[in-house]
Image (tube, helix red, strand yellow):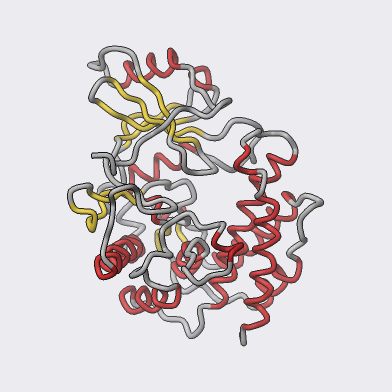
Protein backbone atom coordinates (compact mmCIF):
# COMPACT_ATOMS: atom_id res chain seq x y z
CA UNK A 1 0.00 0.00 0.00
CA UNK A 2 1.54 3.28 -1.15
CA UNK A 3 0.11 5.16 1.85
CA UNK A 4 2.40 3.26 4.22
CA UNK A 5 5.20 5.54 5.38
CA UNK A 6 8.39 4.84 3.44
CA UNK A 7 12.04 5.74 3.88
CA UNK A 8 13.93 7.43 1.03
CA UNK A 9 17.52 7.83 -0.13
CA UNK A 10 19.94 8.85 2.60
CA UNK A 11 20.81 12.55 2.78
CA UNK A 12 24.36 13.47 1.85
CA UNK A 13 26.66 13.39 4.87
CA UNK A 14 24.32 11.20 6.93
CA UNK A 15 25.31 7.81 5.51
CA UNK A 16 25.83 4.84 7.85
CA UNK A 17 28.60 2.24 7.68
CA UNK A 18 26.54 -0.61 6.21
CA UNK A 19 29.13 -3.21 7.18
CA UNK A 20 29.11 -2.11 10.79
CA UNK A 21 25.31 -2.05 10.85
CA UNK A 22 25.20 -5.55 9.36
CA UNK A 23 27.61 -6.99 11.92
CA UNK A 24 25.69 -5.44 14.81
CA UNK A 25 22.29 -6.53 13.49
CA UNK A 26 23.37 -10.14 12.93
CA UNK A 27 24.86 -10.31 16.39
CA UNK A 28 21.61 -9.00 17.90
CA UNK A 29 19.37 -11.11 15.62
CA UNK A 30 21.39 -14.23 14.67
CA UNK A 31 18.92 -15.59 12.09
CA UNK A 32 19.18 -12.55 9.78
CA UNK A 33 20.32 -13.42 6.26
CA UNK A 34 21.75 -11.40 3.37
CA UNK A 35 22.95 -7.81 3.21
CA UNK A 36 21.06 -4.84 4.68
CA UNK A 37 19.34 -2.24 2.55
CA UNK A 38 19.51 1.05 4.45
CA UNK A 39 17.33 4.07 3.71
CA UNK A 40 16.45 7.17 5.70
CA UNK A 41 13.19 8.68 6.88
CA UNK A 42 12.92 12.26 5.58
CA UNK A 43 11.11 13.79 8.54
CA UNK A 44 12.58 15.17 11.73
CA UNK A 45 15.27 17.72 12.42
CA UNK A 46 16.76 16.15 15.51
CA UNK A 47 17.69 12.48 15.78
CA UNK A 48 18.20 10.57 12.54
CA UNK A 49 16.00 7.61 11.70
CA UNK A 50 16.83 4.86 9.21
CA UNK A 51 14.98 1.87 7.80
CA UNK A 52 17.13 -1.28 7.74
CA UNK A 53 15.73 -4.10 5.60
CA UNK A 54 16.79 -7.71 5.26
CA UNK A 55 14.48 -9.01 2.57
CA UNK A 56 10.96 -8.78 3.96
CA UNK A 57 12.20 -8.16 7.51
CA UNK A 58 12.25 -4.48 8.36
CA UNK A 59 13.72 -2.57 11.33
CA UNK A 60 14.27 1.04 12.36
CA UNK A 61 17.61 2.41 13.60
CA UNK A 62 17.77 5.67 15.56
CA UNK A 63 20.98 7.63 16.13
CA UNK A 64 21.87 11.23 17.09
CA UNK A 65 22.67 13.81 14.41
CA UNK A 66 26.18 14.14 13.03
CA UNK A 67 28.35 17.05 14.16
CA UNK A 68 28.76 18.73 17.52
CA UNK A 69 25.71 18.37 19.76
CA UNK A 70 24.88 19.58 23.30
CA UNK A 71 26.21 17.22 25.97
CA UNK A 72 22.84 16.33 27.48
CA UNK A 73 20.90 16.19 24.20
CA UNK A 74 20.11 13.24 21.92
CA UNK A 75 20.49 10.61 24.68
CA UNK A 76 19.64 7.49 22.70
CA UNK A 77 20.15 5.12 25.61
CA UNK A 78 17.72 7.07 27.78
CA UNK A 79 15.12 7.12 25.00
CA UNK A 80 15.37 3.37 24.42
CA UNK A 81 15.13 2.57 28.14
CA UNK A 82 12.04 4.76 28.54
CA UNK A 83 10.41 2.97 25.61
CA UNK A 84 11.20 -0.46 27.09
CA UNK A 85 9.67 0.57 30.40
CA UNK A 86 6.55 2.10 28.83
CA UNK A 87 5.79 -0.72 26.39
CA UNK A 88 3.97 -2.99 28.91
CA UNK A 89 1.65 -0.18 30.10
CA UNK A 90 1.34 1.92 26.94
CA UNK A 91 1.15 -0.52 24.01
CA UNK A 92 1.68 2.12 21.31
CA UNK A 93 5.43 2.19 21.98
CA UNK A 94 7.48 0.22 19.38
CA UNK A 95 9.39 -2.78 20.71
CA UNK A 96 13.10 -2.21 21.29
CA UNK A 97 15.19 -4.89 19.52
CA UNK A 98 18.74 -3.89 20.49
CA UNK A 99 20.65 -1.06 22.16
CA UNK A 100 24.27 -0.15 21.37
CA UNK A 101 26.56 1.94 23.60
CA UNK A 102 29.75 0.81 21.84
CA UNK A 103 30.97 3.82 19.85
CA UNK A 104 33.33 1.64 17.80
CA UNK A 105 30.25 0.50 15.83
CA UNK A 106 28.84 3.79 14.50
CA UNK A 107 30.67 6.39 16.57
CA UNK A 108 27.67 7.03 18.81
CA UNK A 109 24.98 5.40 20.91
CA UNK A 110 22.04 4.09 18.92
CA UNK A 111 19.20 1.61 19.12
CA UNK A 112 17.16 -0.62 16.82
CA UNK A 113 13.41 -1.06 17.17
CA UNK A 114 10.62 -2.82 15.35
CA UNK A 115 9.25 -1.06 12.30
CA UNK A 116 5.56 -0.30 12.58
CA UNK A 117 4.22 -0.43 9.04
CA UNK A 118 1.55 2.19 8.86
CA UNK A 119 0.49 5.66 7.78
CA UNK A 120 2.21 8.74 9.21
CA UNK A 121 0.51 12.06 8.54
CA UNK A 122 3.16 14.66 7.89
CA UNK A 123 2.58 18.09 6.36
CA UNK A 124 -0.29 16.88 4.20
CA UNK A 125 -2.34 13.74 3.75
CA UNK A 126 -0.43 11.20 1.61
CA UNK A 127 -1.54 10.60 -1.98
CA UNK A 128 -4.73 8.57 -2.07
CA UNK A 129 -5.53 9.24 1.58
CA UNK A 130 -8.79 11.15 1.75
CA UNK A 131 -11.20 11.57 4.64
CA UNK A 132 -14.51 13.39 4.96
CA UNK A 133 -14.73 16.29 7.37
CA UNK A 134 -16.51 14.07 9.91
CA UNK A 135 -13.93 11.30 9.57
CA UNK A 136 -11.06 13.80 9.88
CA UNK A 137 -12.57 14.96 13.16
CA UNK A 138 -12.90 11.35 14.34
CA UNK A 139 -9.23 10.72 13.53
CA UNK A 140 -8.18 13.93 15.28
CA UNK A 141 -10.03 12.99 18.46
CA UNK A 142 -8.53 9.47 18.42
CA UNK A 143 -5.03 10.94 18.26
CA UNK A 144 -5.68 13.35 21.14
CA UNK A 145 -7.05 10.42 23.15
CA UNK A 146 -3.60 8.80 23.00
CA UNK A 147 -2.10 11.83 24.75
CA UNK A 148 -4.82 11.61 27.39
CA UNK A 149 -4.07 7.89 27.78
CA UNK A 150 -0.36 8.58 28.22
CA UNK A 151 -1.03 11.13 30.94
CA UNK A 152 -3.04 8.45 32.80
CA UNK A 153 -0.07 6.06 32.98
CA UNK A 154 1.11 5.44 36.54
CA UNK A 155 4.81 6.45 36.50
CA UNK A 156 5.59 4.19 39.45
CA UNK A 157 3.89 1.16 37.89
CA UNK A 158 5.89 1.78 34.71
CA UNK A 159 9.13 2.02 36.67
CA UNK A 160 9.65 5.57 35.43
CA UNK A 161 9.10 7.53 38.63
CA UNK A 162 12.89 7.96 38.89
CA UNK A 163 12.70 10.38 35.94
CA UNK A 164 10.82 12.91 38.02
CA UNK A 165 12.55 15.63 40.01
CA UNK A 166 9.54 16.46 42.14
CA UNK A 167 7.54 19.72 42.27
CA UNK A 168 8.84 22.69 40.30
CA UNK A 169 8.64 21.20 36.80
CA UNK A 170 7.25 24.41 35.29
CA UNK A 171 9.98 26.50 36.88
CA UNK A 172 12.72 24.10 35.72
CA UNK A 173 11.41 24.23 32.16
CA UNK A 174 11.25 28.01 31.99
CA UNK A 175 14.73 28.43 33.47
CA UNK A 176 16.17 25.62 31.36
CA UNK A 177 14.74 26.69 28.00
CA UNK A 178 15.64 30.33 28.68
CA UNK A 179 19.23 29.31 29.35
CA UNK A 180 19.31 27.17 26.21
CA UNK A 181 18.05 30.05 24.07
CA UNK A 182 20.65 32.47 25.38
CA UNK A 183 23.40 29.95 24.64
CA UNK A 184 22.07 29.21 21.14
CA UNK A 185 21.26 32.77 20.10
CA UNK A 186 22.90 34.03 16.92
CA UNK A 187 23.37 37.70 16.09
CA UNK A 188 20.69 37.65 13.37
CA UNK A 189 17.71 36.80 15.62
CA UNK A 190 15.85 38.54 18.44
CA UNK A 191 16.68 38.14 22.12
CA UNK A 192 13.29 36.86 23.44
CA UNK A 193 13.98 38.72 26.70
CA UNK A 194 10.44 40.12 26.95
CA UNK A 195 8.97 36.64 26.39
CA UNK A 196 11.28 34.97 28.90
CA UNK A 197 10.55 37.62 31.55
CA UNK A 198 6.78 37.20 31.09
CA UNK A 199 7.04 33.41 31.37
CA UNK A 200 9.10 33.81 34.52
CA UNK A 201 6.76 36.38 36.07
CA UNK A 202 3.52 34.48 35.32
CA UNK A 203 4.75 31.01 36.24
CA UNK A 204 1.93 28.74 37.57
CA UNK A 205 2.29 25.85 40.01
CA UNK A 206 2.53 22.35 38.54
CA UNK A 207 -0.88 20.85 37.77
CA UNK A 208 0.35 17.26 38.23
CA UNK A 209 3.35 14.96 37.76
CA UNK A 210 2.67 12.45 34.95
CA UNK A 211 4.50 10.72 32.11
CA UNK A 212 4.75 13.26 29.29
CA UNK A 213 5.91 12.81 25.70
CA UNK A 214 7.17 16.36 25.07
CA UNK A 215 6.86 16.06 21.27
CA UNK A 216 3.38 14.65 20.67
CA UNK A 217 2.36 15.43 17.07
CA UNK A 218 0.62 13.76 14.14
CA UNK A 219 3.95 12.98 12.47
CA UNK A 220 4.98 11.02 15.56
CA UNK A 221 1.86 8.86 15.39
CA UNK A 222 1.48 5.70 13.25
CA UNK A 223 -1.97 4.77 11.91
CA UNK A 224 -3.23 1.34 10.90
CA UNK A 225 -3.23 1.28 7.06
CA UNK A 226 -6.33 -0.95 7.11
CA UNK A 227 -8.15 1.28 9.60
CA UNK A 228 -6.65 4.78 9.61
CA UNK A 229 -8.68 5.80 12.65
CA UNK A 230 -6.68 3.35 14.76
CA UNK A 231 -3.39 4.52 16.28
CA UNK A 232 -0.91 1.62 16.35
CA UNK A 233 2.19 3.52 17.40
CA UNK A 234 3.60 6.65 19.02
CA UNK A 235 7.19 7.50 18.05
CA UNK A 236 10.06 9.77 19.12
CA UNK A 237 10.39 9.46 22.90
CA UNK A 238 13.63 11.45 23.08
CA UNK A 239 12.26 14.12 25.41
CA UNK A 240 9.80 12.01 27.42
CA UNK A 241 9.95 12.53 31.18
CA UNK A 242 7.80 13.08 34.27
CA UNK A 243 6.26 16.51 34.22
CA UNK A 244 3.24 18.77 33.95
CA UNK A 245 0.57 17.51 31.48
CA UNK A 246 -0.55 21.01 30.48
CA UNK A 247 3.02 21.90 29.53
CA UNK A 248 3.00 18.79 27.34
CA UNK A 249 -0.23 19.89 25.67
CA UNK A 250 1.21 23.39 25.18
CA UNK A 251 4.19 21.82 23.38
CA UNK A 252 1.83 19.95 21.04
CA UNK A 253 -0.24 23.03 20.26
CA UNK A 254 2.86 24.93 19.13
CA UNK A 255 2.72 22.76 16.00
CA UNK A 256 -1.06 23.00 15.61
CA UNK A 257 -1.42 25.34 12.63
CA UNK A 258 -5.00 26.12 11.61
CA UNK A 259 -6.23 26.90 8.10
CA UNK A 260 -6.88 30.57 8.96
CA UNK A 261 -3.51 31.25 10.60
CA UNK A 262 -1.22 33.86 9.08
CA UNK A 263 1.18 32.92 6.28
CA UNK A 264 4.44 32.80 8.32
CA UNK A 265 2.85 30.33 10.75
CA UNK A 266 1.48 28.30 7.84
CA UNK A 267 5.04 27.97 6.56
CA UNK A 268 5.98 26.21 9.81
CA UNK A 269 3.18 23.66 9.48
CA UNK A 270 4.40 20.05 9.78
CA UNK A 271 1.09 18.23 10.24
CA UNK A 272 -2.32 18.37 8.49
CA UNK A 273 -4.14 20.28 11.23
CA UNK A 274 -5.40 22.74 8.59
CA UNK A 275 -7.73 20.15 7.07
CA UNK A 276 -11.51 20.62 7.32
CA UNK A 277 -12.70 18.66 10.33
CA UNK A 278 -9.55 19.09 12.41
CA UNK A 279 -10.19 20.55 15.84
CA UNK A 280 -9.03 24.11 16.43
CA UNK A 281 -6.46 24.78 19.14
CA UNK A 282 -9.27 25.98 21.41
CA UNK A 283 -11.27 22.82 20.75
CA UNK A 284 -8.20 20.64 21.43
CA UNK A 285 -7.74 22.30 24.84
CA UNK A 286 -11.43 21.98 25.72
CA UNK A 287 -11.54 18.31 24.65
CA UNK A 288 -8.35 17.46 26.51
CA UNK A 289 -9.45 19.14 29.75
CA UNK A 290 -12.86 17.45 29.62
CA UNK A 291 -11.39 13.96 29.12
CA UNK A 292 -8.23 14.21 31.21
CA UNK A 293 -9.82 15.62 34.34
CA UNK A 294 -7.24 18.40 34.63
CA UNK A 295 -8.43 21.98 34.93
CA UNK A 296 -7.08 25.44 34.17
CA UNK A 297 -8.90 28.75 33.87
CA UNK A 298 -6.85 30.10 30.95
CA UNK A 299 -4.47 28.23 28.67
CA UNK A 300 -2.52 31.34 27.54
CA UNK A 301 0.57 30.54 29.58
CA UNK A 302 0.96 27.03 28.20
CA UNK A 303 0.37 28.15 24.60
CA UNK A 304 3.05 30.86 24.84
CA UNK A 305 5.44 28.48 26.59
CA UNK A 306 4.96 25.91 23.81
CA UNK A 307 5.77 28.47 21.11
CA UNK A 308 8.81 29.71 23.02
CA UNK A 309 10.10 26.18 23.52
CA UNK A 310 9.61 25.47 19.81
CA UNK A 311 11.59 28.63 19.03
CA UNK A 312 14.45 27.43 21.22
CA UNK A 313 14.51 24.03 19.51
CA UNK A 314 14.54 25.73 16.11
CA UNK A 315 17.25 28.14 17.25
CA UNK A 316 19.45 25.32 18.58
CA UNK A 317 19.26 23.64 15.18
CA UNK A 318 19.85 26.94 13.39
CA UNK A 319 22.90 27.58 15.60
CA UNK A 320 24.48 24.40 14.22
CA UNK A 321 23.72 25.50 10.64
CA UNK A 322 24.87 29.11 11.24
CA UNK A 323 28.22 27.91 12.57
CA UNK A 324 28.74 25.34 9.81
CA UNK A 325 28.26 22.30 12.04
CA UNK A 326 25.65 20.94 9.62
CA UNK A 327 25.13 21.61 5.91
CA UNK A 328 21.50 20.51 5.84
CA UNK A 329 19.83 23.19 3.72
CA UNK A 330 16.48 22.58 5.43
CA UNK A 331 17.83 24.62 8.34
CA UNK A 332 18.82 27.72 6.36
CA UNK A 333 15.51 29.51 7.08
CA UNK A 334 15.29 28.55 10.75
CA UNK A 335 16.59 31.95 11.83
CA UNK A 336 13.55 33.59 10.20
CA UNK A 337 11.31 31.07 11.97
CA UNK A 338 12.85 32.03 15.31
CA UNK A 339 12.20 35.70 14.63
CA UNK A 340 8.58 35.03 13.68
CA UNK A 341 7.90 32.97 16.79
CA UNK A 342 9.22 35.76 19.00
CA UNK A 343 6.74 38.18 17.42
CA UNK A 344 3.91 35.66 17.76
CA UNK A 345 4.68 35.18 21.46
CA UNK A 346 4.79 38.95 21.99
CA UNK A 347 1.36 39.39 20.36
CA UNK A 348 -0.15 36.65 22.52
CA UNK A 349 1.35 38.22 25.64
CA UNK A 350 -0.16 41.59 24.73
CA UNK A 351 -3.57 39.95 24.26
CA UNK A 352 -3.40 37.94 27.50
CA UNK A 353 -5.02 39.13 30.72
CA UNK A 354 -2.92 36.88 32.96
Q: Is residue 329 left or right of residue 157?
A: right
Left or right position of 230 against 302? left
Query: Which of the two residues, 71 or 134, is positioned nearer the viewer here?
Result: 134
Which quadrant would residue 30 be assigned to in this image?
top left
Q: Is residue 260 left or right of residue 321?
A: left
Tell me, yes or no, if residue 172 can be seen here. no
Quadrant of the frame with the N terminus: top left
Query: Height in image: 291 above or below 267?
Result: below
Q: Which residue is at 61% across, 67% downward?
A: 171
Residue 337: percent from left, percent from top: 65, 56
Q: How many marks?
A: 0
User: Quadrant of residue 307 in the image?
Assistant: bottom right
Q: Which is nearer the eye, 138 or 195? A: 138
Q: Nearer the viewer, residue 186 or 156?
A: 186
Give the farthest residue toward the right.
187
Residue sitting farthest toward the front: 128
Whether residue 134 sits left or right of residue 266 in the image: it is left
Residue 238 pos. (x, y %): 47, 46
Residue 137 image position (x, y, % from top left): 30, 69
- Residue plotted at (44% across, 66% down): 209
Q: Quadrant of residue 40?
A: top left
Asked whether the viewer can see residue 126, the reply is yes
Which residue is at a point 29% across and 69% down the rendered structure image?
133
Relative to 232, say whether 63 is above or below: above
Query: Could you tell me which residue is drawn at 61 percent across and 62 percent down?
Result: 264
If the image is split into quadrants, where does the C terminus sit?
bottom right
Q: Residue furthest left?
A: 226
Amino acid sequence: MTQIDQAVDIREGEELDAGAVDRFMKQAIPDLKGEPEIRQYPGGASNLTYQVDYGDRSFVLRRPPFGKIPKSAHDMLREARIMKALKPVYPYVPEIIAICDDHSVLGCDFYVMERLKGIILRQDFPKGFELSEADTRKLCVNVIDKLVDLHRVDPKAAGLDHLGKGPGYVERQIRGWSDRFRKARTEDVGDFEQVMKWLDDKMPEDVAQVVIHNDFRFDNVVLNPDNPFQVIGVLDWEMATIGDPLMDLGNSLAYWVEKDDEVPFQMLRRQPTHRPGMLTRREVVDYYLEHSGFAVERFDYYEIYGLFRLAVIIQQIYYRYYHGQTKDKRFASFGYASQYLEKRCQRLIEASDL
